[in-house]
Image (cartoon, rainbow, N blue to C red):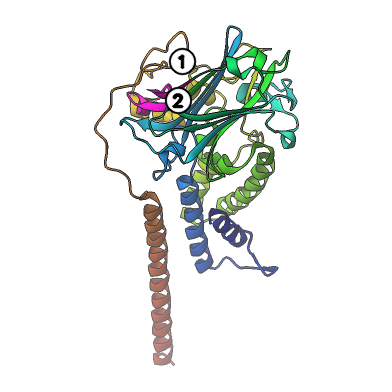
Amino acid sequence: MGRHLWQMAQRLARGFQHGKKISPVPWRQGVLAGLIMACLGWANVANASDHADPSNLMGPESNITDLFFFPDGDRLVLIFNVRRALSTKPPYDLTPYTYEVNLDLTTPVSFDNPADVARYGGTVTAPAKLHADAKVRIRLNNDAGLDRIDYEGLQNTADIRTSFGVRDDPFNFPRFYGVNTISMVMSLPRSAFPAGQKTFILWGTTAKDGMQIDHVGRSIRTQLPRFGFLNTIAPNQQLPALIEHSMRTNDLYNFLKGNKQWWSGALADLMETTFLLRKYDNQPDVMIYTDQFKVGYPNGRLLTDDVVAQTCATGDCLLMDLSFIEGGFPRSTTNDKPFLSEFPYLAEPWPEKPPAPPPTRSLTPYIVAAVILLLLASWAVVQGLRFILRHLWQVVRNIYALATT
């Protein structure tokens, strides 16, 4: 539905209908304003991954929070977390979902572009060839314990150490202090991978009934509003999707920027800062780790990495701003609980809190719809008054003309 709204708004912005030029009459501008508001609202309520995304309220166990990957001695540690802001005791609703981490061991990665290295850990030189050479597929019980784990493409799996359950949420952000997450921790021997393997490309997904719901690659990326649409797209298809999305949003942005209406400039500014893709965004959303460089974001991710500050250093500061708004000054740069120095690394969970009333349905779509209807109603009233005043003025002019002849 969101895509169809974008296409309708794009068609009006371009000013063509059946191949003919459309004049920018007021009713079309009003409809376009409503469509753009709907598009922006839809982008905000779409399912997305990472902590600060709009949550899937009816299925929060599908929401990914974090992906970590780092070496510890002669082993590699993989941590995959879901279900943000957890503060209640089991049972949860975990059994319908499949949690999967994919590892691409062969697609080439270049480290020649300093900007890409700083933002993504490297450059995937052939994004269309991204694939999973190895997989870890997990099903959990509703008490957050393991139901089943399957390995594909990994060797020596008997030496893989695992831990599943509720742990402290390791994300350093004020909103998630004092709450827990559901964590899947794996310590893999180097012998699980081909001899001499130095570079890894990773991403995680959640799915239900075979349909992908959420995706995570590089930290915080799909949390940003402009990337929410990537969550159901496979990494090898993300570059074409990014290019197509950029073309659609640029058409609307250029129209809004060139329009003299007050609302148009305001929406253009909102699009530019929040929804418009940047020139450096055309990389698939994956995590890159290589032994060639020191571990730590964006080269893999450590539990202690302050990714809010690190992503802000390369241009994405949404969470940095929010961390000051919600947490005050000085901003905390460490987790609210110390991490463990050994497996399973994450801190013990926080005590349970009384459960909040279960959500029934997100109010956000209704709020967005109300705003759109209010905008269109206000525009209709103004246009009606303008029509009446013009008609009355014409009547007055006609009467005056008759009286003076």
Q: Which residue is mark 1?
A: 344
The answer to which image quadrant residue 203 occupies is top right
> Going by the image, does 192 lie left or right of 186?
right
**19 vs 158, nearest the viewer:** 158
Q: What's drawn in magenta, residue-wise? A: 163-183
Quadrant assignment for the C terminus: bottom left
29 part of magenta stretch: no
Q: Position of residue 322 (x, y in %)?
A: 40, 30
- Tell me the amino acid under the disc marked 1: Pro
Residue at the image position 53 percent from the left and 48 percent from the top: 268
Label 2 residue SS: strand
Label 2 CA crowd tier, 10 Å (few <14, some 14–19, many 20+): many
Q: What whole-number distance in Å separates the C-alpha atoms at marks 1 and 2?
A: 10 Å
Q: Position of residue 25 (x, y in %)?
A: 54, 68
Contact, CB < 8 Å: mark 1 with mark 2?
Answer: yes
Residue at the image position 68 percent from the left and 39 percent from the top: 239
**223 vs 19, nearest the viewer:** 223
Q: Position of residue 13 (x, y in %)?
A: 60, 59
165 part of magenta stretch: yes
Residue at the image position 72 percent from the left and 17 percent from the top: 194
Sequence-first tag of 1 and 2:
2
